[in-house]
Structures are given as structure tokens and as C-alpha cells.
Image: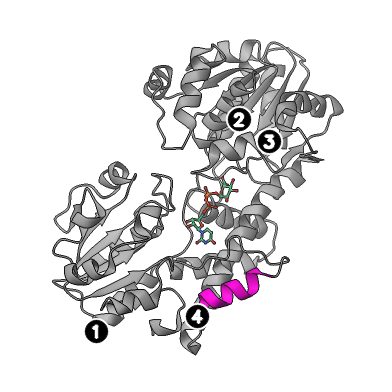
Amino acid sequence: MRATVFGTGYVGLVSGTCLAEVGHQVTCVDVDQAKIEGLERGIVPIFEPGLEPMVKANHAAGRLAFTTDAAAAIADAEVVFIAVGTPPDEDGSADLQYVLAVARTIGRHLSRPAVVVNKSTVPVGTADKVRAVIAAELSARGLPLDFDVVSNPEFLKEGAAVNDCMRPDRIVLGARSAGAVDTMKRLYAPFNRNHERLVVMDERSAELTKYAANAMLATKISFMNEMANIAERVGADIEMVRQGIGSDPRIGYQFIYPGAGYGGSCFPKDVQALERTARQHDYQAGLLQAVEGVNQRQKHKLAELALRHFGGDLRGKTFAVWGLAFKPNTDDMREASSRALLADLWAAGARVRAHDPEAMEEARRVFGQRGDLELCASPASALEGADALVLVTEWKAYWSPDFPALATALGARVVFDGRNVWDPVQVEQAGLAYYGIGRGRSL
Ligand code: UGA
């Protein structure tokens, strides 16, 4: 089938590439000329395991094209995906200007019946808005064309995007017409083998499904961080509690890891946007506000522990920081907990020596040149001249350091484990003070 994808960000590029991988003819459109030229030469603008070879192979096979020419890309497409960004506007609501601009472009250039698919995370009611914009453009052209709008949210995770997209655990389709569902079924048939993954519903339910999924996962994390804060006050170890509750299949082991707060481009933005949507419908979503509030506080947790350890004064202290990306296997630093930590450390007069396996270039872009930050080429070089070590992102490379060597390197012999990946006993036996998240000994 022929599909066109607007937007070559995480969702658009990965979905477009996976559709080409299973044999569809895909054209990816973006307004960013440099990005499109780069993609044509096989330069993938994001770090995502497995994506680059897949882009190159499908481009070389002639199944995956990149263009800035929206009109040509729409001309013969059977399915047109909208996968552009929905950043938060000033009040935290999702900003729909890019989605609606693409809808206008589609309405201006559509010349055959097509299914328009919303893949971006969009507030409830957006499918109706997209439909209205396309219909208005078509009627201005005097073209009473048939088209359908389908809501098909994406559930891929950064760092595992290709795998998630190739093996989705569900494909949610919000659609009004049986014809549109049929087209989408044909498009997704290669992803829907062995057992039924399609969940068909109305557009509003599909739109809310996406927010509900992210809000539920964010809630699990904030809940555990709340428990961690209680655990450290009552002298319990949240890691034991985590195993104790995760073994109940109704709770499950996933997404109950306490830590320095959740980040990324999705959870913070989507929890806020859903809360704003509720408010616009005269409902105070108190639980969502609390999820957000706990997370904001948690991002400052590591700096709080450091301040407490050093008696409230960090002037003249140097902190080694391991991990800057918002989670392992990505170079993405959007809403990363490391940003809150570094801001707090700097505000308290400390200097930082930081390392991340993938996010160094991004860190240079985010922080710029500053005298109180040294970006270091290896985890070991970040320790040079440091008083303390803080682990913010649990990259595998940080899991088994040589603790006695750390004890020698760190002037103040103290580590702050923001993801509870180290064994406190082993750390303390090496002669280091250990602080984790919600482990009785933290206070
Ligand atoms: C999230 C969802 O997991 C995807 O299903 C969804 O498609 C995506 O948002 C989206 O809306 O596009 P992602 O933001 O890539 O994916 O990252 P996650 O792996 O979900 O992690 C989010 C944050 O939660 C990270 O900062 C991570 O460190 C934190 N986290 C995760 C915890 O603090 N504890 C946990 O137990 C799990």
C-alpha cells in the first residue's frame, strides 16, 4: 500500500520506516530541508537502536522516500499519517498548531479518497478538528472528496522504538467508518499476526486511551516515589517493598521503580495536558495534579540528599554525575531529571563533572559553555577531582563500578544512587557513604 507520513520525529520516522520494512511504499515528509537531505543520505537525526540500518536498507530498496514536497507526497497516498509534534503551550495544554497545519496541507492537495490518520498524541476531540479543517479546504476547492479520519495513537518507547513498532502489543484504532477500519487492517496486517492486536473504538476513546496509558504509567512511578519517601522516613527499604508488591500480578513488576523522577517528552507533557483537558471540562483531576506534583519534587531529591549530607553548603564541592539522558538507551534530555539536579547543584555553588554514553552532544547544546561544568569523555574521568558521585540515569555501563577505586577517587567518599542500582552493603564495605532513593539509611 502507499502511505505518506508527515513529521520525521520519533513517531513519524520510526512508524514510516517500520511500514516500509513490511513492504509498504512510504514517503516521509518534513518541513526541515536539512533533516530530509540528511535522511536521504542515511543520516538519522536521533539515537535509536536498530533504526539507522533499517532506514538505509528501505531507502536503498526504494520503499522509503524523504521529501519536503507535501503536494507530491499526498497525490497518490491511500493513507496519510499526521505524526508531527504537539508541544505544551504556555498553560500546559497540547499545542495543535502543527497538527492542524498538516490537516490544512492535506485538504489543499488531496486529489483521491484517502484515510487520514492521527498518530500524534492529541487531546480528545482533535479528530473532529482535523476532519473539519480538511473538509473546509476541500470545499474551498469545490472538491467533495471522500476522506476518513482515524485516531491511531502510538505506544512506542524511546530506546526500544523499532522493536515496539514492529511488535506492537496493541493497535488502537478510533474510526467512524467500516471502510477506514478495513484500510487500516490491510495496512497493519503484517503487524497483526498470530493473535488479534487491533482494538477498534470511536475516535474520542482512542484519543483518551493514549493519555490514559501514559497517565497510568506515570501514576505508578509517582506512587512508588511517594512510597519511597515514606520508606526512608520510617526506616524501611523501598527495594524490598517493590519486590513485595510487584509479585502480586495485579500490581506487576513494571514501572514501579522509584528514582529521581520521570522525564522525557511524553509523561510530563501528557499528564499535564490531560489535567488541562479535564479542567477545560470543569473537572479537577486531583490525582493527576498529585502525580505531577510528586514528580516535580522528586526531581530535586538527589540535590536535597547532597545538601543534607554536606550540611547545606556545597560551595567549593565538585560532583561527578553519571547519566544525563532522561533514561538509558537514548540521547534525549527533554525534561531529564539530570537538568533539575545540575541546576540545584550550581545554585548551591557546586561544580559538576558529567558523563553520559550518548547524550554528550545534546548536553553541550542544552547547557552551552559554562565554567562550572566539565563534560567528560568517560565515567572514570568524571571522577577526577570529584568529592561525590551522583548516578542519575541507570545506563548498564554504570551498574558495576569498582567501589574501592571510587572510594579512593572521591574526596568526600560518598555516592548518591538516583536509581537504586547499587547494593548499599557492597558500597559501604568499600568505605563509601551510600544514599539511595527510599532506602531506610538515606535519612
Ligand atoms: C513513554 C511510554 O512508556 C510509551 O508507551 C509511550 O508511547 C511514550 O511515552 C509516548 O507517549 O510517546 P518514553 O517516554 O520513551 O515512553 O519512556 P519510558 O520508558 O516510559 O520512561 C519514562 C520515564 O519514566 C523515564 O524518565 C524513566 O526513567 C522513568 N521511569 C520508568 C521510572 O522512574 N520508573 C519506572 O519504573 C519506569
Q: Earlier in the sequence, mark 1 or mark 2?
A: 2
| Quadrant containing the N terminus in the rendered view | top right
Q: Secondary structure under badge 2?
A: strand
Image quarter of residue 216: bottom right
> For mark 4, what is the residue?
237
Q: Earlier in the sequence, mark 4 or mark 2?
A: 2
Q: Residue at x 84, y 29 (%)?
A: 177
**In the rendered view, would you say 368 is above or below 373?**
above
The answer for how far apart the CA atoms under marks 3 and 1 are is 55 Å
**In the rendered view, would you say 217 is above or below 193?**
below
Residue 129's mark? 3
Q: Nearer the viewer, mark 1 or mark 4?
A: 4
- Which percent across, then down, holds residue 243? 59, 72
Region in magenta: 237-247
Q: Nearer the viewer, mark 3 or mark 1?
A: 1
Circle 2 crowding by C-alpha within 10 Å: few under 14, some 14–19, many from 20 = many
Residue 82's mark? 2
Residue 372's mark? none
Q: Secondary structure under badge 4?
A: loop
> For mark 1, what is the residue?
311
Circle 4 crowding by C-alpha within 10 Å: few under 14, some 14–19, many from 20 = many
The answer for how far apart the CA atoms under marks 3 and 4 are is 49 Å
Identity, as a three-letter code, of the amino acid under mark 3 = Lys
Q: Earlier in the sequence, mark 3 or mark 2?
A: 2
Identity, as a three-letter code, of the amino acid under mark 2 = Ile
Identity, as a three-letter code, of the amino acid under mark 4 = Asp
